[in-house]
Amino acid sequence: MGENKKIGMVVFSGTEDKMIPVGVISQGAAAMGYDVLIFFTGWAMFRLLKKPIEPRWPKEFEQMVPSLVDGMKRIKAPSWVDMLRQAKEMGAKVYVCSMMSQAAGLRKEDFDSSLVDDVVGVAAFLEMAEGGQVLFI
Amino acid sequence: MGENKKIGMVVFSGTEDKMIPVGVISQGAAAMGYDVLIFFTGWAMFRLLKKPIEPRWPKEFEQMVPSLVDGMKRIKAPSWVDMLRQAKEMGAKVYVCSMMSQAAGLRKEDFDSSLVDDVVGVAAFLEMAEGGQVLFI
Amino acid sequence: MGENKKIGMVVFSGTEDKMIPVGVISQGAAAMGYDVLIFFTGWAMFRLLKKPIEPRWPKEFEQMVPSLVDGMKRIKAPSWVDMLRQAKEMGAKVYVCSMMSQAAGLRKEDFDSSLVDDVVGVAAFLEMAEGGQVLFI
């Protein structure tokens, strides 16, 4: 217990609601002393660009989105980006999938270097995440 | 084998289709002797209210929903709520995310107390789920 | 390290974008020597039929789909089915959920036997996946 706790996240879905748990779990786990490793791929990686795509919310819950956004502000919850930054200050590492970024015609310099540590393949990520819990978000 | 097997679920997505595996995995794992810990957050927590929101189904598979619902009835599969209750009778614990419920203006007494054991933060959940498998649903 | 590494996937969502990481992770993990166990259920199992349903893409990212599909072709990425086949050649096992297939009125012989090893219950899958990482996709 205590040492070598590790949590990995494969962040794929990319709708804005699911970025909240990415931020919350990263920040919470890093604060608890976990090694935190995050692998952005799929639609989610486009939110880490220097010029990120616009946020999308899930169609099924569209009417509830304004209330969620207002509520997060009211309780002064940090944005997922700020939570991710806090996690990174505590040692969390953020990677982008090399295959998916290549398919999208994106290079490392297209991503916000204050958020993204490196562009790596899934095998490299799995190796780093070995022995830890892994969430697919 | 046998002792200390543990499975955690972070249940976020909240569409009704994904509540089925929450019920099935909870019930199945609890019956196999797993410690089962379920953390409801995001859209999913609104299904645990005393007055739950209406079920939503994924837009992409809308035409297939009636057939799924009919099929589940035909094979006499219990509802996900009933499977969750069975899991709880075998020791599964159900938590709601304190941050998301606060953002939604919900208090512990707004949730169905026959389903929800407590409202806790993500750090408390991660601590309980430590060393186990964790699914993000 | 090296022996007994195990990764399980519960593949539920079924939109075509999320089949890509199923293929990539299966293939990558199998090549790294992982035991790979994949449990298709929900909407995803209909993509393994002899006569699979048409691919569906997530509504939220519809405009970006042609660009993703073109990009995957341009970098000559194999399809997820081909990656799954490669994983299977390296030992990955593919299962379909008995409960969901029964609810859908499907039998083992309705599934592509070059892709599906067996139809099993969730308890059998959890037992096989015990001690490994598990992703819910």
Image (tube, coloured by chain):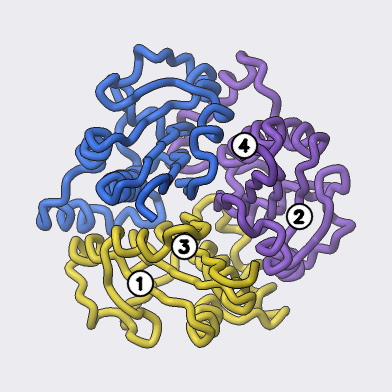
Chain colours: A purple, B blue, C yellow
Instruction: Name the amino acid type tagged 3.
Output: Met
**Residue sitting at 65 percent across and 21 percent down?**
A77
x and y percent of residue B33 in the render?
Answer: 30, 47
Residue on which disc 2 sits: A95
Residue on which disc 3 sits: C9
Instruction: Name the amino acid type tagged 2.
Output: Tyr
x and y percent of residue B102 in the render?
Answer: 51, 17
Residue on which disc 1 sits: C95
Q: Identify which residue, C16 or B81, lies in the foreground.
A: B81
**Residue sitting at 17 percent across and 54 percent down?**
B72
Are the residues at dot 2 and dot 1 in contact (C-beta closer than 8 Å)? no
Q: Quadrant of the N terminus of chain C?
A: bottom right
- Cα distance, mark 3 to mark 4? 21 Å
Instruction: Name the amino acid type tagged 1.
Output: Tyr
Q: Are marks 4 and 1 on the same chain?
A: no
Q: Are marks 2 and 4 on the same chain?
A: yes
Are the residues at dot 1 and dot 3 in contact (C-beta closer than 8 Å)? no
The vertical placement of C65 against A26, above or below, is below
**Residue sitting at 70 percent across and 29 percent down?**
A79
Are the residues at dot 2 and dot 3 in contact (C-beta closer than 8 Å)? no
- Cα distance, mark 2 to mark 1? 31 Å
